[in-house]
Image (cartoon, rainbow, N blue to C red):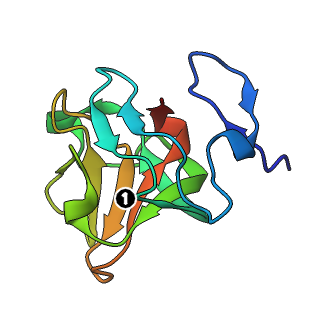
Protein backbone atom coordinates (compact mmCIF):
# COMPACT_ATOMS: atom_id res chain seq x y z
CA UNK A 1 0.00 0.00 0.00
CA UNK A 2 1.24 3.47 -0.87
CA UNK A 3 2.12 5.51 2.22
CA UNK A 4 2.19 8.86 0.41
CA UNK A 5 0.02 11.66 1.71
CA UNK A 6 -2.81 12.36 -0.72
CA UNK A 7 -3.93 15.87 -1.54
CA UNK A 8 -7.55 16.97 -1.51
CA UNK A 9 -9.84 14.72 -3.49
CA UNK A 10 -10.66 17.55 -5.91
CA UNK A 11 -7.07 17.50 -7.18
CA UNK A 12 -6.79 13.71 -7.17
CA UNK A 13 -2.99 13.66 -7.10
CA UNK A 14 -0.37 12.41 -4.67
CA UNK A 15 1.55 15.04 -2.69
CA UNK A 16 5.05 14.47 -1.35
CA UNK A 17 4.80 14.09 2.44
CA UNK A 18 7.82 16.40 2.88
CA UNK A 19 5.72 19.27 1.48
CA UNK A 20 3.33 18.96 4.45
CA UNK A 21 5.40 17.51 7.30
CA UNK A 22 8.43 19.27 8.83
CA UNK A 23 11.56 17.48 10.03
CA UNK A 24 10.15 17.44 13.57
CA UNK A 25 6.89 15.84 12.36
CA UNK A 26 4.67 18.93 12.55
CA UNK A 27 2.45 20.52 9.91
CA UNK A 28 4.43 22.91 7.70
CA UNK A 29 1.31 24.62 6.35
CA UNK A 30 -1.94 25.88 7.80
CA UNK A 31 -4.79 23.37 7.76
CA UNK A 32 -7.94 24.68 6.05
CA UNK A 33 -11.53 23.57 5.53
CA UNK A 34 -11.94 22.07 2.04
CA UNK A 35 -15.37 23.64 1.58
CA UNK A 36 -15.05 27.23 2.88
CA UNK A 37 -11.29 27.72 3.34
CA UNK A 38 -11.59 28.61 7.02
CA UNK A 39 -8.37 28.05 9.00
CA UNK A 40 -8.62 24.98 11.26
CA UNK A 41 -5.00 24.89 12.48
CA UNK A 42 -1.99 27.19 12.16
CA UNK A 43 1.27 25.76 10.88
CA UNK A 44 3.45 23.93 13.42
CA UNK A 45 0.55 23.14 15.77
CA UNK A 46 -0.11 19.45 14.99
CA UNK A 47 1.94 16.27 14.70
CA UNK A 48 1.66 13.91 11.73
CA UNK A 49 0.47 10.46 12.78
CA UNK A 50 -0.80 7.29 11.17
CA UNK A 51 -3.74 5.51 12.76
CA UNK A 52 -6.74 3.77 11.20
CA UNK A 53 -9.89 5.70 12.08
CA UNK A 54 -13.36 5.44 10.57
CA UNK A 55 -15.03 8.73 9.66
CA UNK A 56 -18.58 8.97 8.31
CA UNK A 57 -19.02 10.55 4.88
CA UNK A 58 -18.79 14.35 4.74
CA UNK A 59 -22.19 15.85 5.52
CA UNK A 60 -23.65 18.87 7.26
CA UNK A 61 -23.46 18.73 11.04
CA UNK A 62 -27.19 18.13 11.48
CA UNK A 63 -27.08 14.88 9.48
CA UNK A 64 -24.18 13.23 11.33
CA UNK A 65 -25.76 10.67 13.59
CA UNK A 66 -25.99 6.97 14.04
CA UNK A 67 -28.72 5.70 11.82
CA UNK A 68 -30.29 2.31 11.60
CA UNK A 69 -27.92 -0.06 9.84
CA UNK A 70 -24.51 0.92 8.61
CA UNK A 71 -23.01 4.38 8.18
CA UNK A 72 -21.31 5.38 4.92
CA UNK A 73 -17.76 6.54 5.41
CA UNK A 74 -14.04 5.93 5.02
CA UNK A 75 -11.26 4.35 7.05
CA UNK A 76 -8.49 6.95 6.92
CA UNK A 77 -4.92 6.46 8.11
CA UNK A 78 -3.08 9.81 7.88
CA UNK A 79 -3.95 12.47 10.42
CA UNK A 80 -2.79 15.59 12.20
CA UNK A 81 -2.75 14.90 15.95
CA UNK A 82 -3.50 17.75 18.36
CA UNK A 83 -3.29 17.27 22.15
CA UNK A 84 -5.36 20.29 23.26
CA UNK A 85 -8.74 21.37 21.87
CA UNK A 86 -7.77 25.02 22.38
CA UNK A 87 -4.98 24.63 19.78
CA UNK A 88 -7.58 24.76 17.00
CA UNK A 89 -8.32 28.06 15.29
CA UNK A 90 -11.76 27.08 14.11
CA UNK A 91 -13.33 23.71 14.85
CA UNK A 92 -16.61 22.47 16.19
CA UNK A 93 -17.64 19.19 17.75
CA UNK A 94 -20.69 17.03 17.12
CA UNK A 95 -22.84 15.63 19.87
CA UNK A 96 -21.56 12.36 21.30
CA UNK A 97 -21.89 9.37 18.98
CA UNK A 98 -21.19 6.59 21.44
CA UNK A 99 -17.80 7.50 22.95
CA UNK A 100 -16.80 9.61 19.91
CA UNK A 101 -17.16 13.29 19.03
CA UNK A 102 -16.51 14.19 15.41
CA UNK A 103 -14.68 17.38 14.46
CA UNK A 104 -16.34 19.73 11.97
CA UNK A 105 -15.59 23.15 10.48
CA UNK A 106 -17.08 25.71 12.86
CA UNK A 107 -17.85 28.14 10.00
CA UNK A 108 -19.64 26.00 7.40
CA UNK A 109 -20.40 23.02 9.67
CA UNK A 110 -19.15 20.49 7.12
CA UNK A 111 -17.58 17.33 8.37
CA UNK A 112 -16.52 15.26 9.90
CA UNK A 113 -12.95 16.35 9.31
CA UNK A 114 -11.69 14.58 12.40
CA UNK A 115 -12.25 12.35 15.38
CA UNK A 116 -11.98 12.54 19.18
CA UNK A 117 -12.59 9.71 21.63
CA UNK A 118 -14.03 10.86 24.97
CA UNK A 119 -11.84 8.28 26.76
CA UNK A 120 -8.66 10.10 25.66
CA UNK A 121 -8.77 13.79 26.61
CA UNK A 122 -5.52 14.64 24.79
CA UNK A 123 -6.01 13.19 21.29
CA UNK A 124 -7.79 15.08 18.54
CA UNK A 125 -7.27 13.71 15.02
CA UNK A 126 -7.79 15.69 11.79
CA UNK A 127 -7.78 13.55 8.64
CA UNK A 128 -5.42 14.84 5.96
CA UNK A 129 -7.82 13.65 3.25
CA UNK A 130 -10.61 15.84 4.67
CA UNK A 131 -8.72 19.17 4.77
CA UNK A 132 -6.62 21.42 2.52
CA UNK A 133 -3.21 22.95 3.24
CA UNK A 134 -1.90 26.43 2.44
Image-quadrant location for residue 24: bottom right
**Residue at x 48%, y 42% (from the top left corner):** 73
For this view, does 74 lie left or right of residue 18? left
The foreground one among 89 and 115 is: 89
Q: Is residue 72 above or below residue 126?
A: above
Q: Residue 103, position in %: x, y?
A: 28, 50
Question: How many discs mark residues in the rendered view?
Answer: 1
Residue with the most extreme right position: 1
Kindly tell me whether residue 82 is visible in this rendering: yes
Does dot 1 land on a helix, a strand or a loop? strand
Above or below, comparing residue 105 to residue 87 in the picture: above
Looking at the image, residue 88 lies above or below residue 8: below
For this view, does 40 lie left or right of residue 77?
Answer: left
Indicate the position of residue 108 as horizontal and vertical percent values. Answer: 19, 26
Q: Residue at x 73, y 23 (%)?
A: 13
Q: Which residue is mark 1?
A: 115
Is residue 72 toward the left or the right of residue 42 in the image?
right
Q: Write the residue at 27% across / 29% down.
A: 38
- Crowd tier of the residue under label 1, counting other residues whose Cα lies within 10 Å: few below 14, some 14–19, many 20 or above: many
Query: Front-most of 5 and 2?
Result: 5
Q: Quadrant of residue 32?
A: top left
Q: Position of residue 93 (x, y in %)?
A: 18, 53
Please state the horizontal and vertical placement of residue 118, each as a whole percent of the image: 25, 76
Amino acid sequence: MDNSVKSSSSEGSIVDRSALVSDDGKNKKSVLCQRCGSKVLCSGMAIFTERELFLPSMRKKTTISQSEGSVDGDTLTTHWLVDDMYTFENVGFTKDVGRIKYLICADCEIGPIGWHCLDDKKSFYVALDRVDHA
